[in-house]
Amino acid sequence: MAFQFGLNAEADGRWLALTRSILLNDARWLDQLLAAFPTPESLLNASASALSRQNRGAEIVRRSIEESRPLSLPDSLVDGSGLYLVTPHDPEYPALLAECADRPPFLFVRGDLKHLDTTTLSIVGTRKPSLDGQRAAAEFSAGAANAAICVVSGLALGIDGIAHDAALRAGGATIAVLPCGIDRIYPHRHRDLAQRVATGGALVSEFPFGTPPRKHHFHRRNRTLSGLSMATLVVEAGRPSGTLLTASSAADQGRDVLVLPWSIYHPNGAGCRYLLADGATLMQSVEDLWAYLNVTPAVGPTDASLGWAFGSADSEMPQLTPDQRRLLGLLGDSTHHADVLADTLKWELDRCLACLSALEVDGWVVKVAGGYRVRRQPRTVH
């Protein structure tokens, strides 16, 4: 069974000492060691002959547990509430990730373990999305949540953060996979979002407490992220990009890669077009996603899901009326005449102009030659 931190200080210290060995040893070898000795206690009580069958490294790991100074949880996690350590030999270890040859030997989890054993979809993309990219990330994430699909992403700025936020706002669950220790949220701007994820889903890391987000950790994080999921949806990506590496990891793991199309003139669409040319599956709507995954949504995409794409702070978003949210979602990343917007929404022109004026006063849209568009730098927490 998964080990829960915060219940026994001595046991906490032993597991912490064992998990630190991941920084010094090959992950596959540690996986094999845990198969023979699934707990620190079993390793400490093992006979010399049993240890010798594992090779000399087993004795070194045991000695490190015996000789380590008393270890305790980081101050930020001192209560241990909802804090777990899961190994591939625990029933709570995600089944999809367990299939991967390079599965991590430890998963630190903050949140509810039940989310590790559910239907999952990774949603990833650029850290600097266009307004249409923001809208698409929110729509697809909310659509997945409405069909009881748990959204997995990397808590990064841009598409990742929007996907987590939209899933939670739709009443769904989400898992954030970190490139650092679970006590060191990265990026710092997403600390509040990370807390919401831990409450409405789970934070997951394969790195011991206190580990900083080093460059080579992101590739490992991306492989774990794709390995957790039955498919990876790429919303918007340049070329080259870390998002393409995540998609490549998914393909290597035998998982489906789903991609949104972009214009040949869209710079952040180059990675998506490359993946489509390489055989990825085209997604043009949330309905396409539902059909591909063979799921039935509880409700369809909501007007509010369009507004989430612009990522305003929680305290600001409720100030927008339903009309304003619909209008923002319709504007996307293009410029539109008021009469065209009114006709599309089946509104009287006066109603549309009043809504546009209110949004302009509040700084959400600007009037330019050719009509109205969303501000290029809307107020955002992502």
Image (cartoon, rainbow, N blue to C red):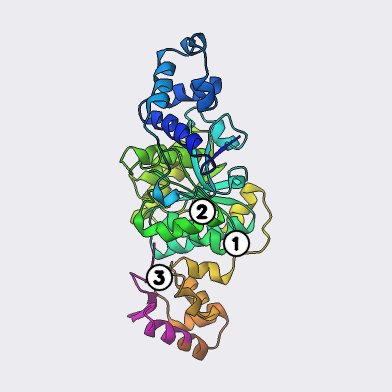
C-alpha separation, residue under disc 1 versus residue under disc 3: 30 Å
Tell me what residue is drawn at x 66 percent, y 64 percent: 299
Mark 3 Cα within 10 Å, few/some/many (few <14, many 20+)?
few
What type is the residue that disc 2 sits on?
Answer: Ala
Q: Quadrant of the N terminus?
A: top right
Give percent across and percent down for residue 337.
42, 80
Q: Earlier in the sequence, mark 3 or mark 2?
A: 2
Q: Which residue is mark 1?
A: 171
C-alpha separation, residue under disc 3 versus residue under disc 2: 35 Å
Give percent across and percent down for residue 179.
39, 43
- Magenta stretch: includes residue 230: no
Q: Which residue is mark 3?
A: 334
Q: Which residue is mark 2?
A: 198
Q: Earlier in the sequence, mark 1 or mark 2?
A: 1
Q: Which residues are magenta?
A: 355-382
Tell me what residue is drawn at x 42 percent, y 76 percent: 336
Regarding residue 284, the answer to whether it shows in the image is no
